[in-house]
Amino acid sequence: MANEPVTLTIDDKTVTVPKGTKVVDAAKTVGIEIPVFCYHEKLGPFGCCRMCLVEVEKMPKMATACTLDVGPGMVVRTNTEKVEKAQKGVLEFTLLNHPLDCPVCDKGGECPLQDNTFKFGAPETRMEFDRAHNLKAAPLSPVITLDRERCIACQRCTRYSDIIEDERALVMHNRGFKNEIGTFNNEPYATRFSGNVIDICPVGALTNTQFRFKARTWDLANSDTLCSHCGVNCNMTMGTRTNKLLRIQSRPNDRVDDGWICDKARWGYDFLESKNRMGMNKSRLSGDWKALTPKEAAVHVAEAFKKIADEHGPESVGFIGSAYGTNEELYLYQKLFRQGLGSNNIDHKTHPGSPGLPIAHHDLQDIETSDLVLLLASDPAEELPILELRLKKVAKRGGVKLAVLGDQSTSMDRYAEWSGRYNVGAAAAVCEALAAELAGSGAGADLAGRAGLDGEQIKTLADLIRGSQKVTLIYNPVPLSAAAHGQLSRLMTAMGQIGEISCGAIPAAPGTNAVGALDMGVLPDYYPGGMPLAGGAEAIQAAWGENTPTAPGLSAMQMIEQAEQGRLKALLIHRANPLADFPGGKRLAAALKKLDVLVVHDIMQTETSRLANVVLISNGPGYDEGTTTNIGGRVQLRKGGLKTANAPDWKLVSMMIRALDENAPEYAASFGVTAEIAEKVPGYSDISKKSIKKEGQTRTQPPVAQGAVESPSEQATAGGLRLRIAHRLFAQDAILDPSSQLSHQFQASTATLNEADASRLGIANGDPVVITAGGGEVRAQAEVSNRVNPGGVVVPRVSDEQDLMTLAAEDAAAVDVKKA
Amino acid sequence: MTQILFKNINLEGLATLPVYEGQGGYRSLEIAFKKQPEEVVEMVKASGLRGRGGAGFPAGLKWSFLAKDVFPRYLCCNADESEPGTCKDRELLLKNPHLLIEGMILCSYACRIQTGYIYFRGEFYDLAQIMEKALDEARRKGYLGKNIMGSGFDLDIHTHLGAGAYICGEESALLNSLEGRRGEPRMKPPFPAVEGLYAKPTVINNVETLCCVPWIISEGPEKYAAIGTEKSKGTKLVSVSGHVKKPGNYEVVLGTPTREIIYDLAGGIRDDNKLKAFIPGGSSVPMLPAELVDTPYDYEALQAAGSMLGSGALIVIDHTMNVVEATHRLMSFYMHESCGKCTPCREGTRWLWQILSRIMKGQSEGDPISKLNDICDNMSFKCFCPLGDAAIAPVVSGIKHFRADYEEFLQNAATGAAG
């Protein structure tokens, strides 16, 4: 077995480690450092740098500790004269043609080559020739610059590209002394995860173009923070100097990111200094724009809402938050609206979905111990990139089978043991079919047929599930209709009812804190901790006080409808941009314009904030600290790093609450709010500053609401094609604007449709097309392929300017596609 | 003299199937197919045949190491003959391709292999064409394909051309190259017998090794084992090059005194010059001084003398040549051919070449000889694969036996005579 213990001695110390451990890692466990360059625990052994040579009794030659498995009774010596001479020799070779431009090197101060030379090297070199010269600044991509002179050919980066990315995009060229890293045909090395090679480079060869020559590493202030771009919440370190963010590096946490971050995490921070950031807190409620201090702004907003709620009833005010707020921000806002204003008009999303799962909420690490991962309606490469790396890893390693069920084939299909494609908009039928098949009702094949899959396929998938010990279902709730959510819930219940199998799910929404937003009760029908209004008023009043509202509130889309009709008078929008992100897009402007009070609390100026009569500055990531809950239910702390005179969001909201209730608590720091969450929100009682410090802490999943799952049927489409809007990692929006370092990753607007539909519509691959629906019109380039079934069209959202949401309806929309 | 591989090597048309069959070609298959595969392995073991590519590992033993019950398995014939001085496989491939095919069929049958590859060095384009023709003939005649000669055994053989890298003669780099990866040696373990080509059990043998097998099966392992010395059985092809009158390939019985090869077969030293040194087994083995010319040409005796039989390339150096110059030329080869994967070989070969160049220019300062020796020591057994050790062999042995040649350059430098 892999975990069988093996005992050996290293420098006379007895070490017991699991079988298969490399000597270099075994030595670490007893505090013995064996120097390495090429070895990296995530890449596995390679043995090319020869830095880790050790003596092993009964072995005629010295061995490389990074390639050598421990053996029982093995006697390893790392500090003999022979080993020390070898180390000095190897370092002399390594440094022979290294430029030693340490005084200006970005890696200086955190460089393994410097450190190993200091600890294990000879005091002087015997190199009597001029050092070889090479290119000092070869751009590998717009964001990575390679200093060829500094490269020591350890091949960490090329192996990363091969083993971790599975792309072999970065490779070694040429041979011997002339070998160098490069790409096919000198094309840019621009994968979604390219930046990790900078972190793992043991010298200053692979440099961050933006950070080059900007600072000495020891002058940086480093904050251990989290990425705020997607629902994985990868751990990262933010290096700042003179209150300026200079670089971002990965900060390995195997429970979350497995040691890597994507390029959006690393370089998607230009919004911090964007000219489009909110300039100041200001209001025009009483005429001209007037600047407000944070305290003034909080009181002003609280009073304006209070006044309307008093005059027109609490149902006339509403709050739309977002999956991008922290738990603290979201918690305080729902508290403001519920306890302060008495309204349940609280929401944060436009797709269906409620807290709680009928089966276990799996953590990301559960993927590694599952034997089947079923990916449903999810495209991790674009939605949650680091999840893609972990799925590739387990699928390639073996032991974990991957089943992919989607309406469009994706990059994950080639790793899949099983893959099936259903019709666009038919997720409900496919979930129903699989649930029926698992329940043995016999109706599965017929239902699958309606979804565009064949009956045999769904049988095979059901058999795969039944034949597993542990199954993880990963699904993206965002594109699923209400009907699909209902059927998905039935599917999960059916999975949970198979005996002997441990089943869990990961609701893999792309939003940073999508799970947290549900948990914090930023919903019209659920209180924090998944407490449903449908469960009765008593329980809610017992937990939140007698005056807390118990009538269901309006959903986000209903609030906008009510605004249109003049019944909703005041709306506060936190970190959301309905005009770009909600179905209807810009067409919603008319409704928002009718509001008496529109407060937008956001980082960036948006189409929506331009309509506001009060704007509040949200500092957001980089500045404010707070916790977020990732797709695996893990709560972690996102620290700040940059300073600002603006009040943090949590502070601003807590001042609003205190403006309405002077007895409300005054928090000294965001952790004060976290402590209140731990006290008040079921499932979060274990969350504290201490418990989440190291690797985060999973919260206890909320209970699933009792009662029958409502399952409306999916609407049939009359004519046209069913549209699904796909998520793109590098989409041009308020966060990644055209000035972003990542603008080279932007893609053109495309529409993927089936060959059958294309030929019927007279559209050829590459043709410009116009897509129309409900008054909206979007231009795109046709991608004619069989990646989608007939009857559907998938259009990725590549930029805000594309106006894609004008085509969208609350449920899957039918669109017309024509050649332009 | 016993001739096994070269008995009829210059027979016209031998490369064609009818002529080859007329010489008794492919008869060994009938014998082998009547036996169990394991018995064929035992015969090769009993013959004492050792790998002719350089390492001299017993061939039968290698075959018996294949991971049990793991299929498919592969046979890779190493026809990447790149060792400086070596050209023996070339002659076999050029003139007697069916002999190799027959040997590969026997090996594949013995090891239950159904796919074989012949990995040619890139420059062997013409030989690969000849081989393709021979393979085609063999396929048509039913020596390859399904149910060969009614035995129920299936095999096909494919040719593959490398892109011209010395390192691809190293077996694991060969596998990488064959798989379409960069020609760099792989970590061992896993050894090819367990995880070789496409991570499946793989036998890798040199052309000459496989060509010995038909004779062993036809004539019997005892007869083969009776040839040669106690531990070095059979005959060996020796490529004699350098300062001799008749350079070329000669088949000798292992244990023949080296003197006989140089003076009798190769006609002695050119211009009747004095023998100064010889490299017995290709450029990767240490050179020996003239005094050791009576050393029997076999694995053990050459090792005892401080060198190795290697690939059987005997490079002869006469008294007109300074060993530093020869070493410099060889180092330029190793610098060029180092794959660059490991640090000591990539950097060391270049540094050694730089120092040797400077010595020859008479510009050295200090004690370059000690430095050369110490750099070699820092490379010795510390590189990823044997290429690094091969690269230092001429330096270390040259300094050991011909220090005077180095000193000549250094003294010239001191007096300003060289330039």
Image (tube, rainbow, N blue to C red):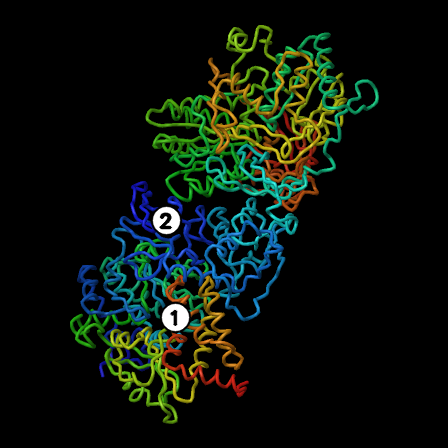
Q: Secondary structure at mark 2?
A: loop
Q: Which residue corresponds to mark 1?
A: B390
Q: Observer-nearest residue: A7 or A123?
A: A123
* Quadrant of res A332: top right
> Given the image, on which type of amino acid does mark 1 rest?
Ala
Closer to the camera, B1 or A295?
A295
Which residue appears farthest toward the front when viewing the image?
A123
Q: Is residue A581 left or right of residue A158?
A: right
Q: In which quadrant will I find the N terminus of chain A?
A: top left
- Write the residue at 17% across / 75% down: B226
Identify the residue under disc 2.
A22
User: Chain ID for label 1?
Assistant: B
Left or right, B14 with respect to A137, comes to left
Q: Is residue B405 above or below residue A338?
A: below
In the image, residue A733 lies at what x, y percent?
A: 67, 36
Counting from the top left corner in percent of width and height, residue A526 is at 55, 16
Chain at tag 2: A
Toward the bottom, the furthest residue is B271
Q: Amino acid at mark 2?
A: Lys
* Quarter placement of the C terminus of chain A: top right
